[in-house]
Image (cartoon, rainbow, N blue to C red):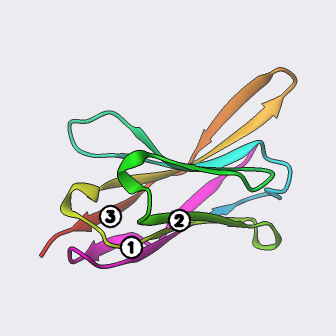
Amino acid sequence: QVQLVESGGGLVQPGGSLRLSCAASRSIFSIYSMGWFRQAPGKQRELVAVISSGGITDYADFVKGRFTISRDNAKNTVYLQMNSLKPEDTAVYYCNAKILDGLRLNNYWGQGTQVTVSS
């Protein structure tokens, strides 16, 4: 198991930047993957970015070139650097960890952090 705590959300103007952090309660070194999802009002939760235990990253098309996911195993923390933010990036951003338990991947979620992009 793992507890995840997000931070770094807030209000930013279009074109601005934010860095989200996700602090885990245990070592993330061996966690199968960690990622960021987001959910806007009235919409389904969607994948934003993911990073594997080996450091391989993948991004949703709508954030490629603007967002960067990274991990610091020494700090048990995953980051999401968000640049060139747009109003449509407004959502609650959730940290996700997938932990392998035998042949099953279990999902763990943080409580979410609000990101609002508005002038």
Q: Residue 68 carries which label?
A: 2
Please, what is the three-letter code of the amino acid marked with disc 2?
Answer: Thr
Q: Position of residue 83 (x, y in %)?
A: 38, 73
> Image quadrant of residue 14?
bottom left
Q: What residue appears at the point 34 percent right and 61 percent down from the top-left corner?
A: 114
- Count the labels in the image: 3
Q: Which mark is residue 115?
A: 3
Q: What stretch is highlighted in magenta?
A: 1-21
Q: What residue appears at the point 39 percent right and 69 percent down from the top-left corner?
A: 9
Distance from the alpha carbon under mark 3 to that under mark 1: 12 Å
Report the residue marked by disc 1. Answer: 83
Say whether residue 9 is left or right of residue 79.
left
Is there a contact, CB below 8 Å, between mark 2 and mark 1?
yes
Q: Where is residue 38 in the image (x, y as percent from the top left)?
A: 39, 48
Dot 2: element: strand
Residue 16 falls inside the magenta stretch: yes
Please, what is the three-letter code of the amino acid marked with disc 3?
Answer: Val
Out of 58 and 73, give the one closest to the viewer: 58
Residue 70 lies, with reference to residue 60, above or below; the image says: below
Q: Which of marks 2 and 3 is in front?
A: 2
| Sequence-first disc among 2 and 3 | 2
Say whether residue 72 is left or right of residue 88.
right
